[in-house]
Amino acid sequence: MSHLLWFRQPAADWFEALPLGNGHLGAKVYGRVADERIALNLDDVWSGDGPRTLTVPDGPAVLADVRRLLLDDRDQLAATERTRALQGPLVESYQPLADLVIRTAGSPGASGAADYRRSLDLSTGIAAVDYTVDGVRFRRETFVSAPDQVLAWTLTADRPGAISLHLSLESQHPIVAEVADGTYSVTGRAPSDLTIEYRDRPDPIRYEEGRGIGFGVALRVVTAGGDVTTSAAGVVVRGASRVTVLVSAASTFAGWNVPPGRDLSVALAQATAALDAVDLDKLRHRHVEDHVSLYDRASLELGPLVNLPTDERVRAVAAGGNDPDLVALTFNLGRYLLIASSRPGTQAANLQGIWNRDRRPMWASDWTNNINTQMNYWLADLTGLSECFEPLADLLDGMAESGAETARILYDAPGWVTHHNTDLWRATWPVGDGGDDPVWAMCATCGVWLTAHLMEHYRFTLDVGFLRERAYPVIAGAAEFVLAMLVEDRDGVLQFVPSTAPEHHFVLPSGAKASVDLTSTYDLWLIRELFANLRAAEEVLGVASELADRAASAAERLPAIRVTPDGRLHEWPTDWQPSEIHHRHQSHLYGLYPGAEIDPVRTPEWAAAARTSLETRTDGAVNGGWTAAWLVALWARLFEPDRAFAVIQDYLSRLVSGNLMHRDGDIFQIDANFGMTGCIPELLLQSHTDVIRVLPALPSGWPDGAFRGLRARGGLTFDAAWRDGELTSAVVRAAHAGTFRIALPSGEIGLTLAAGASQVLV
């Protein structure tokens, strides 16, 4: 059942709870019978009290030292250490909001309830719990509405008057409860100061009166029958036949570049106004209609449908089984999660989407920009969710503004820059206050990678207005920065200095580990792509700038892509020994995916080197969920479907909870879920070259299947089906007129389509 997750028991913990959201308000539903808990998050409730000022002294002088150490002294270790002086403050952390606690009078635990079933219908965005107690059948439904900006929880019983319960709101933050006009509410503040989870100090979570982002959560209950009593202790319902609980929340966040508002009543009034505006008769319909309008744009079916609990299916795959329908469910779950965590006007999906249980979450639950933020959005345009891409473009707008100041202070450079970590306040500097390892902190091309998403969004949608107004200025600003950072080495080659391969040390002949050097292959791919995208954007817009001319000239003087004597792509300018041969990052293979310069047909030598690099890197278990997703796309681009299939099987066996959400011990990162959804289609449809490939890398483990609504660059949409590994039908639809080359398994065809036209291919 490729659109339904279901279980025979409540969630054992937060990881197993079912996610709901509207991009702004997130919820995790446990499904407990007697003592239900729904964990709430709000996308703009973070620690901190406004934007901070970067106070790194003498940044340009430090940069000059680093360049001298690398270009003249060839001292990578000293250069690595010197870059610590460029580090600014650590990022702030995404916060939990509150928990809705529902205690049902007289109900036993799940073990005492008969016919228990917990489910999440991805196609409607509704979580349900069904169970029987003392002969009474109960049903709960929970959803978070984007049109009405509320969470709705409904409990019905097939015996009149059978529902009695107590509702309250709890929070890890200090809160004050109040009652006004029948509405129960709480107000509070997130920490004004917080130390990131991997740093120790005696008081890591600090609340200062009147500082920090404030929030208000409002709750209202509507019943059929029964009595309702509301007090500061919560809401008590007795003898009802149906109960609907509405929850809305708002914060005092006023923008990334200003301090938050101080008046908590403003946030509470906004939350209460959302409750006032709800038309209960239309609420569910409006939610489903909105959700379906996005979710129905694409789908994947693989093999026969399997009607077993999702957690049992995960265990069966871990035991060696093949469940193609579970892969389809994984694909559809990623689309669902993006719809739930990234909508126009909201924050972009962060390292955990919008779901977080901890005040000091792993890695701050921030935006991690050396692949994780990017991976969150690989699926957006590919599966027809262009609206869900908008928050990423908004995030880049803020980064570009903040990053212009960072570029000036640290590097005396024009344009804009962002490094490894970004938070709600749009920090763009290398983080750590001098105490973080430059191997991750000193990554000055993260913004360059992010600009590639803007150009890709144009290529999928052909939205010239977006390209002109949103994408081009940000791309041009990144190019200005990169051009200013390029310096000649002793051979006249332009080097981007300082440079790293994200999170991966190299080992010097002395045995010491370093991470900063001249241009890494990762940075080289990014800069080549940036300069090409700048020129391509100008060609579309009819612009011819001096900036693009300088970029084109600089591109000719960049280092060459190099292959080691044993046939691998270089990761660093010197073939240093890697500190981890099976490292999780595949950054030197960016040109294969998500870039497009490496292709087995067009650049077979580079493709062979990429294959050798992958074989060396992945000779063992996959190191992490997001790594697995990346590997699927890399193998797909090399036309190695069964290797990609093996990675997917391993991922489902070891790296997900029973609800298919990524889990690695006590670590949750949503990039793995998004990444799998973005990478699985690379096995079925590729459009990154001038030839669109249908079923380019179909795994033998998926002999039968179909997809609908996958997008290709050029404004095309494809549907296809296959049986026994053979393509049986394929249709293409064009949003814009154009001429295309399409490679089917039977051969390549040329096709000219008018805007709005469709063509049966098979």
Image (cartoon, rainbow, N blue to C red):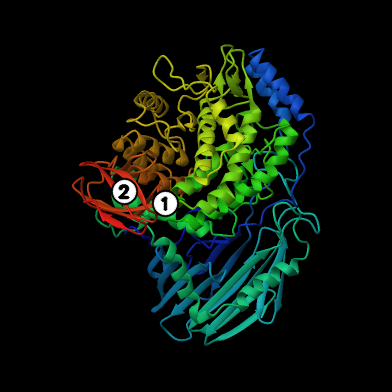
Q: Nearer the viewer, residue 379 or 355?
A: 379
Q: Nearer the viewer, residue 381 or 27?
A: 381
Q: Nearer the viewer, residue 153 or 144?
A: 144
Residue 434 seen: no
Crowd rating for badge 1 (residues with CA inside 10 Å; few <14, some 14–19, many 20+) = many
Which disc is residue 316 wearing? 2
Q: Is residue 678 above or below residue 179?
A: above
Amino acid type at mark 1: Leu
Residue at image coords 65%, 70%: 271
Location of residue 115 in the rendering, given as x and y in whole percent from the top left corner = 36, 69
* Secondary structure state at the residue bearing disc 2: helix
Residue at image coords 66%, 29%: 484
Look at discs 1 and 2 and give the one toward the viewer: 1
Crowd rating for badge 2 (residues with CA inside 10 Å; few <14, some 14–19, many 20+) = some
Residue at image coords 57%, 70%: 150
Residue 542 seen: yes
Q: Nearer the viewer, residue 666 or 281?
A: 281
* Cα separation between marks 1 and 2: 13 Å
Amino acid type at mark 2: Ala
The numbered mark, 1 or 2, whose residue comes first in the sequence reads 2
> In this image, 128 relative to 417: left or right?
left
Image marks 1 and 2: residues in contact by CB distance under 8 Å: no
Which disc is residue 464 wearing? none
Location of residue 692 in the rendering, given as x and y in whole percent from the top left corner = 33, 43
Q: Quadrant of residue 517?
A: top right
Residue at image coords 43%, 43%: 655
> In this image, 498 relative to 114: left or right?
right
Looking at the rendered structure, the number of numbered marks drawn on it comes to 2
Q: Which residue is mark 1?
A: 660
* Secondary structure state at the residue bearing disc 1: loop
> In this image, 712 relative to 363: left or right?
left
Q: Quadrant of residue 391?
A: bottom right
